[in-house]
Image: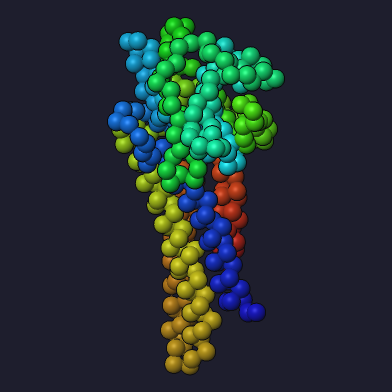
Amino acid sequence: MDSSYLRISLSFVFWALLLSPAVSQSSSCSSQTFSGVRSYPHCLDLPDLKAFLHYSYDASNTTLAVVFSAPPSKPGGWIAWAINPKSTGMAGSQALVASKDPKTGVASVTTLNIVSYSSLVPSKLSFDVWDVKAEEAANDGGALRIFAKVKVPADLAAQGKVNQVWQVGPGVSNGRIQPHDFSGPNLNSLGPLDLTGTTPGVPVSGGGGAGNSRIHKRNIHGILNAVSWGLLFPIGAMIARYMRIFESADPAWFYLHVSCQFSAYAIGVAGWATGLKLGSESKGIQYTTHRNIGISLFSLATLQVN
């Protein structure tokens, strides 16, 4: 196997590895739709568990309306969104848990006052909650959604923020939720929720501005990398492999090859820089595998150019 063929193979492999995470990242809360006509001016791409939160807050009556969306960790599993009035973790949280009935397939919501990790018995919450329902998100990988309105306690309303916790789990047995995983994403799924619509470290979409700008940058990042690694680099390698055997193509094949490779590298630099910019703007979210693949691929390309 000569070096040109190897470059073609590696380019396609790296392109697939690099772009597959980018495609998964393109999903955003601002692109979601759900039943009902109510407007939610704020939405968050939560940092872990592929979760999203749409919400609105009426300060006049301290009412928080939310739509929480996430895929269960396994088919038939559950999702949960909670407010912790006193602390930041799951213990002490007032939780809304959604799951589907295995017989009817109907999604419903249960309330849990989580006194401790060993006490997960359905119970009334410490604050009022109403208009509660659940639904399965159509064409969204089996995700479930929780709709609810919450009466924010006066002390939390005065602070302008609440401690939110979210979680996903594998199943429900005899009316009780089965334990969730204790991996990094499950342990990191918590943080402050600013009732005014600004949550540090979490990408926010509202009214189209910031959310649409971020989506636009993601699209540019994906397109630049697709053109560079998926199109121009392979074409340049194929020109070097298949055209140079024809005497009539000499030296035209060489200039075409160099032009493709140089253009691919230049566009790749732009795509890489756009990715760094996106990463710097999303301090609360890290796509480690995607980032490492991008750095490795860019380093190898730089060595080849040199």
- Residue at the top extreme of this rendering: 154
Does residue 213 appear to the left or right of 108 in the view shown?
left
| Viewer-nearest residue: 168 or 85 | 168
- Residue at the front extreme of this rendering: 103
| Viewer-nearest residue: 35 or 259 | 35
Q: Is residue 280 visible?
A: no
Q: Residue at x 67, y 20 (%)?
A: 117
| Viewer-nearest residue: 199 or 121 | 121
On-image quarter of the C terminus:
bottom right
- Residue at the right extreme of this rendering: 118
Q: Position of residue 194 (x, y in %)?
A: 44, 21
| Viewer-nearest residue: 257 or 111 | 111
Q: Residue at x 50, y 38 (%)?
A: 105
Q: Residue at x 46, y 63 (%)?
A: 228
Quadrant of the image occupied by residue 114 = top right
Q: Residue at x 50, y 26 (%)?
A: 109
Does residue 200 appear to the left or right of 171 in the view shown?
left
Number of marks in the rendered image: 0
Q: Position of residue 17 (x, y in %)?
A: 56, 57
On-image quarter of the N terminus:
bottom right
Quadrant of the image occupied by residue 94 = top right
Q: Position of residue 193 (x, y in %)?
A: 47, 22
Q: Is residue 220 visible?
A: yes
